[in-house]
Image (spheres, rainbow, N blue to C red):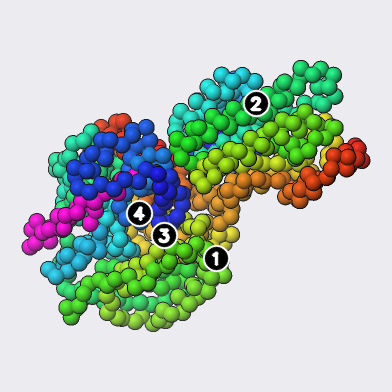
Amino acid sequence: MLVVGGSSEIGAALARAWLRTGTRYFAVTERSEGRAAELVADLESGGATVDAVVLDALRPESIAAGLEAAWKDGDVDVVVIAIGLLGVQRDVEADPSLSWDVLTVNATSTIQLALDAARRMEAQQHGTIVLLSSVAGQRGRRDNYVYGASKAAVDTFGEGLQQRFAGTEIDVMLVRPGYVVSKMSSGVDPAPFAVTVEQSCERIIRAIAQRKEVVWVPPVLASLFFLFRLLPRKAWGSIVVRMR
Amino acid sequence: MKTISGWGGNPKSVTNLVTADGPAQIAEAVASAPTDRGLIARGLGRSYGDAAQRAGGTTLVVRTGREPTWVDQSKGLLRASASASIGELIRFSDPDGYFIPVTPGTRHVTVGGAIAADIHGKDHHRAGSFGMHIESLRLLLAGGETVEVDRESDRDLFNATVGGMGLTGIILEADIRMIPVPGNRMLVDTFRTADLDVTMTALSASESTHRYSVAWVDLATQGLSMGRGVVTNANHTTSEGSAPLGETEVSVPSMWCFGIVNRPTVAAFNELWFRKAPGQSRRSAQSYDRFFYPLDMVGDWNRFYGRRGFLQYQFVLPFEAEARLPEISELLATSQFPVSFAVLKRFGEENDGFLSFPTPGWTLAVDIPISSSPHDLENLLRSLDEMIVDNGGRIYLAKDSRLRGDLLSAMYPELGSFLEVRERVDPNRRFQSDLSVRLGL
């Protein structure tokens, strides 16, 4: 297993769930050696063995090296890409250069990671890539349109990647959570149908086994956003205004 | 590239499936296969998990066409090609009054596979495992040399190959000591047992009187009846010159892809199967097919498990720890996962194979359909793994598809010796299977 973004709450929760079953080779990636060591200590406290790989999502060479290290001991069955920057919308509007980080981590690096993992899984002829997108990618929204744009990129990318591996033993899964109660969302007011990290984790693990292509967390959001996607701009716009 | 799997239907592996006929082609295939992901030999694909497949690598189906021959008929010493099936050997030796000393629950297992998995049968408490009846074998090594191996010439290589899951090289041929039998029928005593305790007692009592002894047990029922079963004990007996084996009468068609094995159907089947058996012990003469290979009569029965397939979990618990068997059975019976099939048996003496599975104790083999929550199933099996290891037991690799390598050295104390031989004859790991990679072999 490889969880990229191991210290993200979803990433760490998934790591813990898999480590309980004695998953043999486990690598979590972390931005710095210090945080990597902390993470390993935390995860290993359950008695498992964890390998931490240092990977800085803002540097392409670091991404390539990180995956190389994760794959050195043999096949990796599941790669979860759980890095993400929410960004504070207001700050980004005030300083546009901040948009680079949000888009780099959420879209560019995520895509590079996924493509590299895909290439390696092609050689091993099996594997699952889990991409964490968001409902924010479904439509532009006043409150999070930079974040939403990055997630929209992941969605379209993911759809194409799925077509590349259609009919093979390589699965690509797009997870679209709504509002997840976590550190990352602590600055944002909860939206309806909020879920916890544990609930998201459970859905993801189950869906991987079922080889689902798209997972909405919670499932009701699938119908909701199906409708939202059909709305003309003006109608969507007034709903957004009413949501604020 | 082809998608293949073991008998349980999972995991599936996309592999370069190659067939090689005869030693020359086999050597050629081994030499020319890409080395990055390795190669593994495959017989009739009856191992349940991923022992005979290599995702992204080469899977070599081996045929060495030669018919079995007697090396010394008076001693029952037979030379067989590794691709010969147990069924073929039985048909060959029957007219001369011999039978295979160890047979598993299906006759569609190759000699090579039988050695590589060091298979056992219903007579393990008397006859031990398959490897014990092998005089010598011919092995193609990673470097291209073919060697004759026996306990005298290279004891370590012999013991690494018996039970070695095909990882020391490709078995080409073996000399097997067959057993003389009075005829080709079995005298079978069948009776019901009310619960696990009674089943265990009955099996213990049968050892001295019967060569073959095994119990089907019901692990779908909870409570007092858990572990109720049907014991079948047998000995060889005379016959009236009939054919030893028949043909498969009916096959599940390949179009059948939905599973019908679930808790209600299992409960119904178990009730019927239990009631069908006589309350009092009843003796009957049975053919080899009926006693040894009832499941072979329905071809491709694994299709009843549908596309998801099923998992087999077989372990052995040493006699010293037999008090834990009811607890383990209880965990299985009360879990959210239906146990669709369970068989209990007593093992006799251990073999010298480094990775040989049988050891004196109780062995339980269960089938579990793959559910929609395999993660939860894995959690359950992992805790069973840990319990079994804590009590000195182990898991059977030929049935396994999900064990983690961290427990392997505790399960198989001679793992170190196996790895030494592997390092000696295949340092570049030319031979690899999904199982070997998963377990770090």
Mark nearest the camera among 3 and 1 is 1
Q: Is residue B248 left or right of residue B258?
A: left
Using the rendered image of the protein, determine whether residue B127 is visible from the camera's viewpoint. yes
Which percent across, then down, holds residue A67?
Answer: 53, 27
Identify which amino acid the numbered label 3 is placed on.
Leu
- Name the residue beneath numbered marker 3: B364
In the rendered image, the vertical position of residue A165 relative to residue B364, given as above or below: above
- Name the residue beneath numbered marker 1: B262
Q: Which residues are magenta?
A: B59-84
**Identity of the residue drawn at 22% across and 43% down:** B25
**Identity of the residue drawn at 40% across and 44% down:** B1
Circle 1 residues within 10 Å: few <14, some 14–19, many ≥20: some
Q: Nearer the viewer, residue B95 or A160?
A: A160
Measured Cα–Cα span from mark 3 to mark 1 = 20 Å
- Name the residue beneath numbered marker 4: B45
Which percent across, then down, holds residue A81?
Answer: 62, 33
Using the rendered image of the protein, determine whether residue B351 is visible from the camera's viewpoint. no
Measured Cα–Cα span from mark 2 to mark 1 = 45 Å
Which percent across, then down, holds residue A123?
Answer: 45, 35
**Identity of the residue drawn at 30% across and 41% down:** B167
